[in-house]
Image (cartoon, coloured by chain):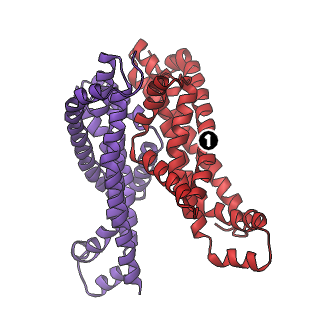
Chain colours: A purple, B red
Amino acid sequence: MEMGFRWDFAYEILPQMLWATLNTIIAAGVGYAIALIVGLFFLLGQRTPSKIINGINREIVEFIRSTPLLIQLFFVYFVLPQFGIKLSAWVCGMITIGLHFGTYLSEVYRGALEGVSKTQWEACRALNFSTVYTYRRIVLPQAFPIAIPGMGNYLVGIFKDTPLLSTIGVAELFHAATAVGGYNYRYLEPYTMVGIIFLILSVPAAMWVRKLERKVNVAQGKMKQ
Amino acid sequence: MSYFAFLAEHGMTLLLGTVTTVKVLICSMVLYVIISMIFGLMRLSKNLIIQGIATVYIEFFRGTSLLVQLFWVYYVLPFFGISLEAFVAGVVALGLNFGAYGAEIVRGGILAVPKGQWEAAHALNFSPAKRIKRIIIPQIFPIILPPAANLTVELLKATALVALVTVVDLTFEAKQINSITWLSAQCFGTALLIYYIMARLALVPFLRWLEVLAAKKVGRGNV
């Protein structure tokens, strides 16, 4: 077998890899959209006045957060059909990623809401604003900028966890690389290219998130003055 | 088949897998802590080359997926004549990946020690070694331990990935039993429970204990 990086082979498989990259981006985007919504439900469960619901919610969140995404994927993919629910690998993957990262996003939301000063609430009470109005016009506009860096971090996080989907057969980038590698019996180029594609996409994204974070910190520092 | 019959038949196998998972966890934990300290310090170096190396390392390992790194170490390194055993490859990949995240925590911790502490130690004519050992390091631990604890729980979860490069850990065993018996709910459910118990009843209390200990050492007992 030829040693070293074979550029001609890399060039040959490039179109295939780029198509698969598109699938990875779709998977990350859809998974993220689900996670954003699931996070809202966990946040709701946490902020309802009922202590029982709070407790159950917390245990569910803790359970999902302290177990590996990989086994959760297997669980959803293999167990649901036993109860007669037949879903494709894509749907299973999206649901699992959405649930897993939804727990993390609910924490981001919570932190952002707690980041809004209590006096804002008191002022709204004093002005006789309704709860809905307070959230919509006063609290959420202030909480949202605080949540943005955390939300961005988890978008990058989801993107980097999409290769796990290949284990249940979702045809994303890593799956394509494994298939190409197995077919040609050369793993050096496909896996290296996956790494490079990930770097190209996620390093600028992460830098952008860090920039946002700095911006938010500065803005908050100004608010305190 | 009842759940207890399942446990009687396959519980031992899962437990053996758990032992491997714990081994992977401990080895990669040691490795990642060492790497974090080295690269965290390098990141703060005034020498631009050393700082650059650390930055490239950190960005590279944080920018790519752990699974890709793991497969790269296990399947691609042999192309360059470096064949690692699955267990070693898993530990190395985990250590390198989490070391990059840890290095940033260490860097933040060192920067968070007030400058006055350095100056005071200097003014008291402490030697550089003594300054670091007696003044700076004890103050760093209470700052870096809470984020490091989060990272370590993430590490426990990430150890599941080594099953994909044929390390016979808890995840591997669960998958194996699943493919023989097709009792998916039982085997993956049990695996999830074991991971949960490891995280909540062993790892987190241990890390909390470390945090309290570190806080007490610098006289902040009520943290």
B58 versus A76 height, above or below: below
Judge left or right: residue B41 versus residue B184.
Answer: right
x%, y% of residue A167?
35, 27
Q: Give the percent coordinates (x, y) of residue A90.
A: 23, 32
Please count the marks in the image: 1
Q: B107 or B168: nearer the eye?
A: B107
- Residue A94, position in %: x, y? 26, 39
Label 1: which residue?
Answer: B31
* Quarter of image, res B110: bottom right
Query: Which residue type carries mark 1?
Result: Leu
The secondary structure type at the circle numbered 1 is helix
User: Residue shown at 21%/41% (left/top)?
Assistant: A26
Quarter that holds the N terminus of chain B: top left
Point 24% across, 27% down: residue: A13
The quarter of the picture where residue A72 lies is top left
Pinpoint residue B51: horizontal percent, then vertical percent.
Answer: 53, 58
x 27%, y 26%: residue: A8
Label 1: few (<14), some or many (≥20) within 10 Å?
some
- Dividing the image into 4 quarters, which one contains the C terminus of chain B? bottom right
The reply to whether residue B182 is visible in this rendering is yes
